[in-house]
């Protein structure tokens, strides 16, 4: 399962990441509220471990905004606040559970396991735009119900656009998602990948859905706009 840790204390975030990775989770980290929201808008996370007090946006603001955008993952709020009012405030913002600092790693892992069991039936498994469809469960993309034969990188690129249709995805973000963080990839390599995906969409009879936003990146858009 994929987990995002949103925690501004870098030492604590590093410790949490270590424990979760040892437990078999795939883990990403954000150190402020704005970055946490951007990552959840870009990637599909099963669980979010969210600190209450963070720079730029608090955990309460992050949870409220993500739930407003129909974020379906489980949210575990971490905080030093332990009054009943704080507990109610955290849960009302969209958190599913609440863990007061300091805590033991075993308790954190147990709460995440419980959240994951409750969340299994909640995820949206199909994402679609026009007649282009991403099946999250089978990790396939089809057009007009006909599966596209995509390489792993082609799939990662097209699924990124499908998850946020009509929104521009920057080149740096696309490279990070498709090739990995810190990958030394040129713009020419990205453009070549996009050309290959466009050819496969053309061969499937799809209209020109991938739009180039010069100087920035790409987006999925209405071919008639």
Image: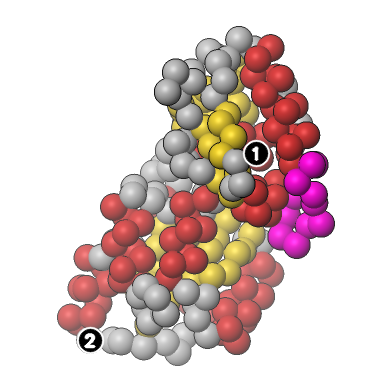
x then y, percent, for residue 73: 43, 53
x then y, percent, for residue 181: 71, 60
Kindly give the residue lying farthest to the left in the view shown.
Answer: 85
x then y, percent, for residue 132: 52, 22
Give me the residue at 74% from left, 41% from top: 190
Q: Which residue is the site of mark 1? A: 157
Q: Is residue 180 left or right of residue 53?
A: right
Magenta residues span: 179-189
Q: Residues within 10 Å of mark 2 (few under 14, many from 20)?
A: few
Q: Is residue 222 left or right of residue 18?
A: left
Q: Answer above or below: position of 180 versus 148.
A: below
Residue closest to the eye, 213 or 18: 213
Q: Which one is closest to the eye, mark 2 or mark 1?
A: 1
Q: Which residue is the site of mark 2? A: 83
Label 2 residue SS = loop
Query: Does residue 117 show up?
Result: no
Label whose residue precedes the other's in the sequence (2 or 1): 2
Q: Answer above or below: position of 175 versus 193.
A: below
Query: Does residue 12 show up?
Result: yes
């Amino acid at each position: 399962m994929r987990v995002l840790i949103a925690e501004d204390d870098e030492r604590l975030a590093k410790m949490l990441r270590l424990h979760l990775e040892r437990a078999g989770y795939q883990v990403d980290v954000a150190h402020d509220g704005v970055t946490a929201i951007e990552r959840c808008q870009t990637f599909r996370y099963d669980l979010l471990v969210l600190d209450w007090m963070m720079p730029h946006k608090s955990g309460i603001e992050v949870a409220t905004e993500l739930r407003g955008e129909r974020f379906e993952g489980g949210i575990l709020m971490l905080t030093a606040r332990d009054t009943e009012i704080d507990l109610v405030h955290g849960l009302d913002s969209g958190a599913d559970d609440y863990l007061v600092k300091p805590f033991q790693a075993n308790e954190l892992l147990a709460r995440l396991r419980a959240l994951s069991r409750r969340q299994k039936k909640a995820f949206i498994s199909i994402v679609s735009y026009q007649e282009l469809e991403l099946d999250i469960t089978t990790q396939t993309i089809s057009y007009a119900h006909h599966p596209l034969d995509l390489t792993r990188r082609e799939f990662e690129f097209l699924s990124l656009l499908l998850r946020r249709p009509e929104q521009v995805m920057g080149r740096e973000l696309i490279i990070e998602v498709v090739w990995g963080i810190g990958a030394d990839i040129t713009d020419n390599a990205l453009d070549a990948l996009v050309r290959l995906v466009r050819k496969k969409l053309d061969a499937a009879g799809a209209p020109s859905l991938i739009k180039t936003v010069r100087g920035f990146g790409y987006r999925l858009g209405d071919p008639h706009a």
